[in-house]
Image (cartoon, grey):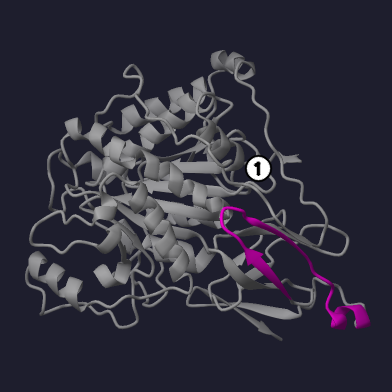
Amino acid sequence: MILRTPLVAGHQLQLLLLPSVLLLMLHLLLCDAKTVNPGDSMQMQHHQMTAEPGLPEPRAYMPDAQHLDFVYHDHEELTRFLRATSARYPNLTALYSIGKSIQGRDLWVMVVSSSPYEHMVGKPDVKYVGNIHGNEPVGREMLLHLIQYFVTSYNTDQYVKWLLDNTRIHILPTMNPDGYAVSKEGTCDGGQGRYNARGFDLNRNFPDYFKQNNKRGQPETDSVKDWISKIQFVLSGSLHGGALVASYPYDNTPNSRLLKGICRSSALCAMFQTYSAAPSLTPDDDVFKHLSLVYARNHAKMSRGVACKSATPAFENGITNGAAWYPLTGGMQDYNYVWYGCMEITLEISCCKFPPAYELKKYWEDNQLSLIKFLAEAHRGVQGFVFDPAGMPIERASIKIKGRDVGFQTTKYGEFWRILLPGYYKVEVFAEGFAPREVEFVIVEQHPTLLNVTLQPSKYLVATGTSTTTKSSTVNRRVNGKLQLSPE
């Protein structure tokens, strides 16, 4: 079943309109879109969604210099590339803007999938966000090359075809185009271009789970918040520069505090934070460590834990808990996880923040496999649907893995996903007007578990005949951004 809907329903995201002369190309590259049948309303089975055993690794990619070379692209060049790619590959890409920067630059997102304009039931949405700090543009360029790699390899690379057939990949190459515009190539340190045009650090501008964030919301962060509130993203990576490590939530801690009067130099602050900060672990710490290791171990250098500078410590296995590295308030990865259950990690992929362009090809070679294998992790764990007794999907049912307090919700089609490692679990499902339910299930390696749950109307409603829209058997509260599920 294919459900044709706007990319983000009820929102101002606008799909790029293809020039009419290019619409003739639409019939040239048609491909079959795969569907997932929800099946019976109550079942659990192990569902093969990962690449078949023995599937070749993604091949090395040599870009077509006529379309995308290893150079830095300003906003106009970036826009031209995305538009040209969308026109050239209309069956694999869709281009839309989630908003504009302060100076009026579009925050472009490219969807790469075999169903770019369509929501296909059961297909998870994942994302990459680059260049949140304007003077850290390596990730920006890596994401452009990733787009190019996907569209040029779909028909020749089995792994890429499997990934695009089973996943909807949203790529935001630059979240801070204004900061990039004033950054300088070859500048490895410093803050010029890091902030948006109003001087705000966008990775300190999100609501925070541990501390009240009083910083005024910026157009770029407001656009991202609106974006992720409309799409149930399962997995996400944010690309940065200045270190070589995969960092995972939490970034903040209840015990963190501003080091006023203690830190008088950036070197002293770094040393204090490195040796004094303690880990701030999420209920899904095992999953976040695994996701970080997937990226680090597929990277050419990261897992070796090589320090960028002799004066700074190395990261064991190339990963770190964010707060153990240094606590921060208002970070994007914590917001994704606590507010929406999206598993996001921060990927620091270059020791130099803005290295010279001739090094970009090497960065691509180092990160190519990691960027692809990380996205495939969206197919690990449990996925399924929540139905009512008539087999209709229940939208915004609240779901929590027992023992893991951060919850998430079903889509309008009743879908849910949760990345989990092999083991025994119990899921708790709540929905307005229905009796809550617990279901046990098992996760095995490499085989996601398909779990469909049917909820029954609450006994109170059945006994009184009250409309299911007027009384709920459970109350869903959000306290400090955390979903609290409790009986009435």
Q: Residue at x 47, y 64 (%)?
A: 287
Q: Secondary structure at mark 1?
A: strand
Q: Is residue 456 magenta?
A: yes
Range of magenta residues: 438-463
Q: Is residue 411 magenta?
A: no
Q: Residue at x 51, y 34 (%)?
A: 160
Q: Residue furthest front?
A: 54
Please provide percent x and percent y for residue 41.
82, 59
What residue does disc 1 label?
119
Residue 259, compared with residue 72, is above or below; it is below
**Res 12 visible:** yes
Residue 318 figure quarter: bottom left
Quadrant for the N terminus in the image:
top right
Residue 222 relative to residue 47: left or right:
left
Q: Residue at x 65, y 42 (%)?
A: 119
Residue 263 relative to residue 413: left or right:
left
**Res 198 visible:** no
Please provide percent x and percent y for residue 116.
58, 35
